[in-house]
Image: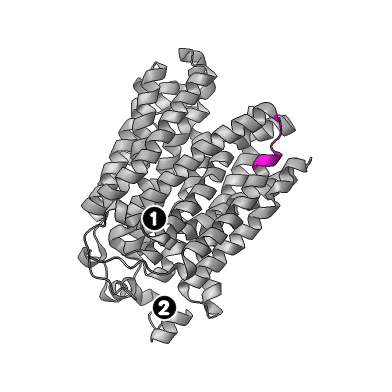
Amino acid sequence: MASEMASGAPTEQETMGEQIGHVRWTICALLFAATTLNYMDRMVIGLLKPTIQHSIGMSELDYAYVVDAFQAAYALGMLVMGRIIDRVGTRIGYMVVMGIWSLSAMGHALANTVMEFSVARFCLGFGESGNFPVAIKTVAEWFPQKERSLATGIFNSGTNLGAILAPLAVPWVAAHYGWHAAFLITGIFSATWIVIWFSYYRRPTEHSRVSDAELRYIMEGITEAPKPGTSWIKLFGFRQTWAFVVGKFLIDPIWWFYLFWLPSYFTSKFHLTLSSLGLPLIIVYTAATVGSIFGGWLPTPFRKLGMSVTRARMASMLTCACAVIPIFLVAYMQNEWACVSLLSLATASHQGFSANLFTTVSDMFPRSEVGSVTGIGGTAGAIGGVVIASVAGFILQYLHTYAPLFFIAASAYILAWVLISLLAPGLRKAEIEA
C-alpha cells in the first residue's frame, strides 16, 4: 500500500469514486464562489475610476494613495489573518474575513472624499487578505495531499471569473443606478454565502454528510496529531517558510502587473477604446481560469509516470515556469491577437504555477501552521506588488517601453522555481516540535 501511494498508482477507493462521496467538492465550490466575490469587490474602484475622479475631484496622485492604502492593509492583513485563522478555525475564520471585506466594499458607497475612500480601501484590503490563508487551510483540511493542487486551482480560478464578471456588471449598475450603487452589487451575494457557509460547513470529522469512505479518503496519508500553532518567529526559522515567501515575492507582483497595466498596455500599443478593450481582456482572463484548473490537475500525469506527489508538484511548476518565458516577445510584436495569445498563455501558466505553489504549504507544514505560513507568503507577495508598481511607474515614465517589464515577467517563475528547489529540496516536511 505504501509503495502504491508513493508511486501515485490509484487506490481501490480512487477507482470507485462514486462510493467515496463528493462533499469535499461542494466545499471547494464554496471556496470558488468566495474567491470570485473577493475579486469582484476589489476591482470595482478601478472600473469606476474615471467616474469617481470626475465626481469628487480625485487626482491621479490621490488615486495612487487610495491604491496604496489597499496594498498596505493587504500586506499587514496577510500576517494577522493567517494567525487568527489558525486560532479560530476555518468555519468562523471565513465568516469573519468575508464579513469584513463585504462591509468594507459596501462602505465605499458612503465615501465622498479621498480620505474616506482610503479608509474604506484599507479596511477592504485587510479583510480580503484573509481569503487565501483560510481557503488554503480549508483545502488542507478537506482534501488528501494528491488532490490539493487541483482543488486549489479550482477555487483560485475564481479570481479570473471575478475579473470577468466585474467589467460586465459594474458599468451597467453604475449607468442605471449611479456609481454609489455599484459598490453594493456583491453585498447580497456575500450575505447569502455567509449563511450557506455557516449552515453547511463543518470539519470532515464533524460533517454529517461525509461518508466513512470519503473521510478515509480525505485522511489518507495523514499521520500528524493536532498541535498548537507555532510562533511566527519560529516559522521564520524554517527554510520551507522562506521557500514559499520567495516564491510569492517573485510571482505575485507579475499578476498585479497584469491586473493593473494590461488595459493601459493594450490602449497605448493598439489604440483600443474602452468599448473594444473588453474582448482581449476577457480572453486573457478566461485563459487564466483554464490555466488555474489545468495547473492544479497537472501533477496527476506526472504521478502516473511514477513520481511522488511532491516531485510531481515541482515538475508541474517547472512546466508552467517554462511556458511563461515567451511573454518577453510581447513587447516587440505588432499583431494584437498574437499578443493576446502569448498573454493568455502567460496568465494561464501563472495561475497553474500559483495553484501548485499554494499547495506546497500543506505539503511542507502540518495543518496547524498552514494559515500562518500562507499569510506570511501573502505578505511577501503584497510587498512585491508595491515594488513592481514603483518599478513599472519609473520604467514607463522615463523609458516609455514595456519591454523590461515583460522580461521581468518572463524570468520571475524560473528564478522562483530554482530558489524554491534550493531552499526546500523535495518539499520536505518541516520538522516542527510541539
Q: Which residue is mark 1?
A: 29
Q: Position of residue 52 (x, y in %)?
A: 48, 19
Position of the N terminus, as image quadrant, is bottom left
Q: Are marks 1 and 2 in contact (CB under 8 Å)?
A: no
Q: Position of residue 118 (x, y in %)?
A: 39, 24
Residue 184 makes an appearance in the image: no
Residue 210 makes an appearance in the image: yes
Secondary structure of the residue carrying tag 1 is helix
Q: Residue at the location (26% across, 66% down)?
A: 433
Q: Position of residue 238 (x, y in %)?
A: 38, 60
Q: Position of residue 183 (x, y in %)?
A: 40, 28
User: Which amino acid lies under the numbered mark 2 shown in the image of this protein?
Assistant: Glu
- Is residue 104 located in the magenta-colored stretch of the structure? no
Q: As rendered, which of 82 and 135 lies closer to the eye?
A: 82
Q: As rendered, which of 86 and 352 lies closer to the eye?
A: 86
* Disc 1 packing (10 Å; few <14; some 14–19; many ≥20): some
Left or right for 240, reference 234: right
Q: As rendered, which of 89 and 48 lies closer to the eye?
A: 89
- Residue 193 lies, with reference to residue 69, above or below; the image says below
Left or right for 77, reference 315: left
Q: Which residue is mark 2?
A: 14
Q: Residue at the location (52% across, 16% down)?
A: 59
Residue bounds of the magenta highlight: 399-405
